[in-house]
Amino acid sequence: MKVIIVSIDKTFRKWNTLPAKLADIEDTLATMENSDFEPIEVAYQYDTPMVEDGRITHDWMDSFSHPWWKAGYDFVILHMSRAQRTKFGINPTLNGAYHVDYDPVSEMYVMADEDSRRGRFNLFVQTTLHELRHAITRATLTTDDTHMLHGKDRDIRPHFDLLDMAQYQPNWHNLNKQLSLYQRVLELMRQQFMTTPTLYQECLKALGTDASPLDTAPDSLGCAETVSELIRRVIPTFPRYTGTASLKEALDKHPRFRKVTIPMPGTIIISPTDIHKPYPGHAGVFGEGEKIMSNDSRPEYLGKFMQNYTLPSWKKRWGGFATSYYQLIN
C-alpha cells in the first residue's frame, strides 16, 4: 500500500520533526494485521481548493487526488497549514476530513502546523491517523468507530491493531453503489409487476379454463385464438386470430412484442402451420422453467388452457416447424 501526503504548504517538507512524525504514522499502520504499507512519501503541489459550506468539494478533491492515484498511490492526503485553512474559508473547527465517494482511491485532507497540538499529542499525527482509520475501516467493511474511540481516548494510535488489511477492498464504495442501483431497479420491477397485469399472470389465472369461450375456432384447433384472448387481457385492442400464421405475422409487426432467443415466463412460442407438414402448427406461452401452457386438444381437456408441454416435448412434436419466441414489452 502506498501513501502520499501532498502539501500545499511549501514549508511542510522543511519541518525538522517531519521524519519522526512520518515514522510515528508508519509504525502505527504496521500494527494492523497483514499490513503492507510502504514508507510514506511527501510532495509539494500548490493549488487552491474549491470550498463550499466550509468544506472542500468532492469534485475538486477528485481532480486533485486522481492523478496521484493513477501514479500508483492508494491513499492521497492533502495537507495545508492552519493559516491556509482560514484563507480558503474552511470551517475553523475542522482539522481534517475523509471523502466518502465511489472511486478506488482513499482521499482525505489534514490541516495542521508542525507544532499544533491535540491535547498532549501532535495534531498532524493524530489527524492523519484519524482520517486514515476512517478510510481503512470502511474499505475493510469494519465498523467505523473512529470518532467514538478518538473521543474516548485522545490518542488514536493504539486502535489500529484489530484492523486487518487482508480485508481491504478499495472498490467497496463502487460495489455498494451498484448494489443500491440494482436494488432500486428490482424494486421498480417489483412495483410494476404488482400493479400492471402481465401476460404470464393472466396465463396462470386461465389455467384449467376455456380461455377462448367464443370458440371462433374449433376447440381442437383453438391455440391461436386462446393466445390472442390472453393477450387481449393485457392489450385490449389486440385482435383475435384463429390461425398460427396470422398470429405470428401480427406479433412480428406489433410494437409491444419483441422476438427473443431465450424464453422466460410469459414468452409466447409459435410454430406456425406449414402446408408442407402433415399436421397443424401450435402456439403457447412459457411458464416456469421449460414448461409450456397451451390450448389442449386431448378429449379429457378439450379446449382447456393447460400446462401440457415442455420445451423438449414441443421440439419433439414441432421440431420441423419454424419456431419463434415473442416477449411482451410492458
Image (tube, rainbow, N blue to C red):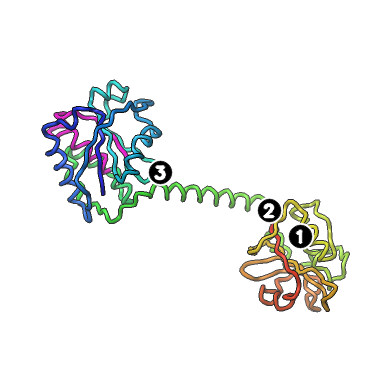
Viewer-side label of 3, 1 = 3
Q: How packed is label 3: few (under 14 Cα within 10 Å), some, or many (20 or more)? A: some
Q: Which amino acid is tagged 2? A: Ile
- Which of disc 3 and disc 2 is earlier in sequence? 3
Queried whether the magenta region covers residue 119, the answer comes back as yes
Q: Which amino acid is tagged 3? A: Tyr
Viewer-side label of 2, 3 = 3
- Which of disc 1 and disc 2 is earlier in sequence? 1
Q: Where is residue 141 shown, x and y percent of the image?
A: 33, 51
The quarter of the displayed image where residue 284 is located: bottom right
The quarter of the displayed image where residue 152 is located: top left
Judge whether residue 275 can be spotted in this image.
yes
Q: Where is residue 14 shown, x and y percent of the image?
A: 15, 30
State the extent of the magenta-drawn residues as a range. Answer: 107-133
Q: Secondary structure at mark 1?
A: helix
- In the image, which disc is placed on residue 37? none
Measured Cα–Cα span from mark 3 to mark 1:
46 Å
Queried whether the magenta region covers residue 182, the answer comes back as no
Is 65 above or below relative to 328? above
Q: How packed is label 2: few (under 14 Cα within 10 Å), some, or many (20 or more)? A: few
Q: Which residue is mark 3?
A: 102
Q: Where is residue 121 shown, x and y percent of the image?
A: 14, 35
- In the image, which disc is placed on residue 230? 1
> Are circles 2 and 3 on residues that touch, CB within 8 Å?
no
Is 108 above or below relative to 218? above
